Amino acid sequence: MTGVTGGTGLTGVTGGTGGPAGTTGYGEAAEQLAVQYESVDFAQVHRSLLHLYPAPPARVLDIGAGTGRDAAALAALGHRVVAVEPTPELRAVGRRLHPDVELRWITDALPGLPRLGAEDGRFDLVLITAVWMHLAPAECPPAMAAVAGLLAPGGRLAVTLRHGPVPPGRRMFDLPPEHTVTLARSHGLRLLHRGERGDLHGRTDVSWTELVFERGR
């Protein structure tokens, strides 16, 4: 889940509704969030990062896929895409909105990704778009360990970090980018790109940091 651009907050901590804590408030708002998420497209959200993404066909993992906007766009380009989304209402909307592309949907959650971790194979590209802010600081190290373990040699991880006030009823943490960079490096991931951008929905008090890492070959 996101506050803006389209993934779901994935955490293994249980929230008041029985799901992961980071998903609080998203299921009941799935339809209106879908309108918000789908109002911007994949190319807009990832425009400064596209040159760092592998050419198709690559194996891609979208963690916190939300309504599947990015996952569907990548599948349409010829990638083999796994979409991880813990909120059933968003998965249902995603299947309805993107029925014509081949996506594999999985119900799983950071920090551990236990179901995905049991899968065979590794990924050439992992997206964590507008999701990392749902992890408490103590959850970030195991989350990074899980994600790093899913990257193929030479695989790349793209993370967007949200900065700004937390919407009412949501669970978010504003961590400095250096925290994530240091954590990634501790798992053998090299920083390839760091950039800043404003909010695509026009909120002047929200901004984003974009990070891309690469696992050694």
Image: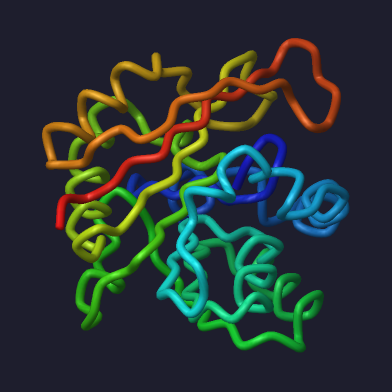
Q: Which residue is at the far top?
A: 205
Q: Quadrant of the C terminus?
A: bottom left
Left or right: residue 60 versus residue 167 is: left
| Residue name at image x 61 percent, y 77 percent | 75
- Residue 146, by quadrant, is bottom left
Q: How many marks?
A: 0
Q: Vertically, is 127 above or below 94?
A: above
Asked if residue 181 lies left or right of residue 64, the reply is: left
> Can you give x and y, in whole percent of width and height, for residue 131 in the image?
51, 42
Which x, y percent locates residue 110? 34, 52
Residue at 50% across, 29% down: 161
The residue positioned 64% from the left and 14% from the top of the image is 165
Query: In the rendered view, how is the structure colored?
Result: rainbow
177 vs 14, nearest the viewer: 177
Side (left or right) of 119 relative to 66:
left
Picture residue at 27% right of the left edge, 53% below the top: 147
Residue 198 occupies quadrant: top right
**Residue 108 falls in image quadrant:** bottom left
Q: Is residue 101 left or right of residue 193?
A: right
State whether residue 122 is above or below residue 3. below
Q: Closest to the observer: 23 or 16?
A: 23
Give percent across and percent down for residue 155: 30, 58
Vertically, is 51 above or below 88? above
